[in-house]
Image (tube, grey):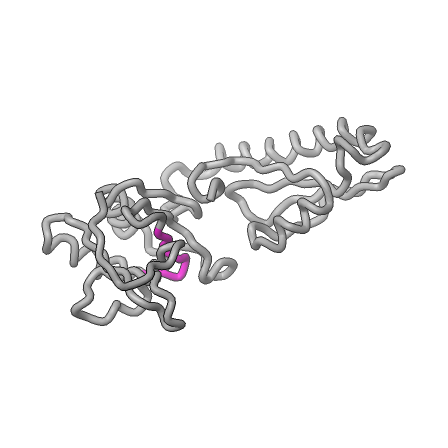
Amino acid sequence: QQLRAEHYKVVVVNGRTALRWVSRAGLTKWHDLARLTGPPTATVCVGDTSSPLFVGWSCNLQSQPGAMRHADDIAGIVRTVTRKKRNHRRNSTVGTDTSLPRGAHARTGTELISLLATWLAKSSDQTIGDVSRFPRAPWISVETPLGLMDLNADTRRSAVSAFLDHVRQFEGAVELHVVANRRGRINKVVFDPAKPSPIGWYAYLRTARPASTSMTLP
């Protein structure tokens, strides 16, 4: 939830167990950067995501005997990797990145409308997120009276356009309806219960409800 709600630039991961859990959680895939001789031997890794940048190492600096000998080398590698990331950003053309960042967050219905309308106007992407790596991952989080709602990465451009057209008819009021998903869990969020959801609208409450209900975003 923190990674989705905050805009971290770099995440450092200390120890083999932590590396394993980050990978299992689907946050990033690790690639080896360097191998440090021991004892203990250690591997320094970088993740395959650009935002945030993940850097980690297999030794446990604060508790593994002898691991602190690697602290200076690890610090140097982290500095080098993050410096390359900053230089890449400086050399990139300003305003060319029109994709929605993973973890974007809307606190109100107005913010959600603004976020999606800006993306629709400035981007040519067909989905709000990167479906090559995270096809069904939560991409945008939204605060609602019933708890956090997520829009998944594979939410399509056509569905976003249909949502914005719908709320314009009601002068920007964002009334949403929670219904059962295909498995019977009541957490699917639709914006027009009178019609089938448009293909490609993938919005879900994180906490299922006991019965179908409606809500209006603040």
Q: Is residue 135 visible?
A: yes
**Residue placed at 80% from the left, 29% from the top?**
68
Q: Would residue 44 appear left or right of 185 to someone viewing this image?
A: right
**Residue placed at 27% from the left, 52% from the top?**
120
Q: Which residues are magenta?
A: 149-156
Residue nearest the viewer, comparing 114 with 187: 187
Query: Is residue 151 within the magenta segment?
Result: yes
Give the quadrant of residue 193: bottom left
Give the quadrant of residue 38: top right
Query: Is residue 128 within the magenta segment?
Result: no
Residue nearest the viewer, comparing 176 with 95: 176
Q: Would residue 74 appear left or right of 156 to someone viewing this image?
A: right
**Residue placed at 72% from the left, 44% from the top?**
33
Q: Would residue 1 appear left or right of 32 to someone viewing this image?
A: left
Total residue callouts: 0
- Outermost residue toward the front in this view: 210
Residue 208 horizontal/vertical position (percent): 37, 59
Residue nearest the viewer, comparing 163 with 176: 176
Residue nearest the viewer, comparing 63 with 110: 63
Residue 207 horizontal/vertical position (percent): 39, 55
